[in-house]
Image (cartoon, rainbow, N blue to C red):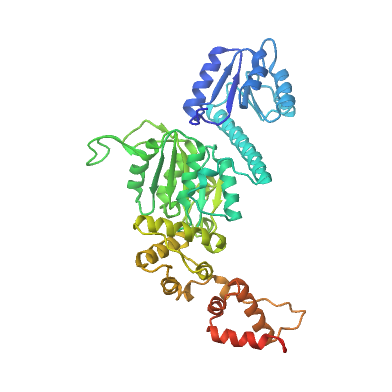
Amino acid sequence: MNQSLYPEFGVLLVDDETSYLRSLSILLERSGGITHIHRCDDSRRVMDILQQQSIGLVLLDLTMPHLSGKQLLTMITEQHPDIAVIIISGLNQVESAVECLQQGAFDYFVKTSEESRLIEGIKRAIRMQEMRRENLALGQRILNNSLERPEVFEPIVSRSPTMRAVFQYLESIAPSNQPLLICGESGTGKELLAQAAHQLSNRKGPLVTVNVAGLDDNVFADTLFGHQRGAFTGAERSRAGLVEQAANGTLFLDEIGDLSMASQVKLLRLLQEGEYYPLGSDRPKRIRARVIVATHQDLPARQADGSFRKDLYYRLCTHQIQIPPLRQRKEDIPLLLDHFIRQAAAEMDKSAPGYPPELPLLLSTYHFPGNIRELRALVYDAISRHRSHLLSMEVFRQAIGNDSDELPQAESTPVAFNPELPLPTLAQMDALLVEEALQRADHNQSLAARLLGISQPALSKRLKKMRPVGN
């Protein structure tokens, strides 16, 4: 199926007036960007079409020969309850509308209704159907703990259950035409997820990427929308913007949280209206790309301080992914370490070295404020210095040794005690801390001592004191 059609499922127009079917099709395509359209001028063929085609929405006339719209509405809701039905009738009767809604119609419009109201109602039904289908697909994947296309995620090195859930969610929403918001700290791999989303969508157009941080309003508009010849001084020829270059594909806007307020308004209009004006042009063009945005910013906090528009945020977060930082997926550190060692060695034309078994444990004690990007840089630096058989741990110790300013905020959070119980003694607290440090360091005393901020001999003395007499 041509994935550039919108929506993913078909929209069936049913009316015995061929001329109205043609004009409605043109209206849906030009004003709504709805291109996945089937037409039927014989009500007797409707149920066969629903059996043969993947239809998600039916626009149904009421007054037709052979089978009336009300008869068809009853048949569709009984036999195909997953298909939404909108009545578009020449009858402006409240009783008729109420009866249709009671029978299961999603909405009711009169043919003389304003075109904008009709288009918005149809788009609302499409969004509802998309969300319903996505939820069903996501639920099925979670129940089966499965991925339909695991090869798409091979560039993202992870065995984290949290990341697997992200992959399953991404597979479910990939066909959607709605925006996708990817949030996560710097260095967590937001662009890799955007690439996976584009690949999963099977869109025929390209993935076009732009970092919008630092773009002023004029450059932002010119970059996205392009310009006509003579639009401004120096515009000697027309130039297509990135929105047009991404036609039938995906437009990825990175660092969206850094957009100025004026640029946010322009992006909001693009998403709301589905159309834009190249600079110097008075003829609108429709966007034919799926929009993915990413940010490391806390957008709810930026809304609270007035630097990010709430209406834009709600347009962007129809689908949202939060990538966990590396410190929350430490099970990925050994995999990433092996991956970057092989990658760096190949690029530097060296043999991939081995490393001490304590190295992943050492790295797991570090906070990694730069996330995967920082780990990659550490490995590349170590490989560039490597001369012996085993990779030196000293290079990593030097790099992460002075990380007292980068420890998690939990370090400074007061420990809560139950006021109804007696306080533990200092000796008991000392033992609890030592035991926790040993567990986190997989009983490696050197690493446990580092976590506690003491020397390894000092930890050994504590352990001897903690041993029961006679052991």
Viewer-proximal residue among 13 and 465: 465
Quadrant in which residue 147 is drawn: top right
Q: Residue 99: in sight, yes or no?
A: no
Q: How many marks?
A: 0
Residue 197 is situated, as x and y percent measured from the top left of the image, at 50, 43
Q: Is residue 419 above or below residue 32?
A: below
Viewer-proximal residue among 243 and 95: 243
Residue 183 is situated, as x and y percent measured from the top left of the image, at 51, 53
Q: Residue 165: in sight, yes or no?
A: yes
Residue 454 is situated, as x and y percent measured from the top left of the image, at 54, 83
Viewer-proximal residue among 182 and 77: 182
Q: Residue at x 52, y 21 (%)?
A: 25
Q: Is residue 449 above or below residue 281?
A: below
Q: Residue at x 60, y 50 (%)?
A: 165
Viewer-proximal residue among 92 and 387: 387
Q: Residue at x 55, y 41 (%)?
A: 149
Say whether residue 418 is left or right of residue 145: right
Q: Residue furthest front?
A: 389
Q: Residue at x 62, y 34 (%)?
A: 129
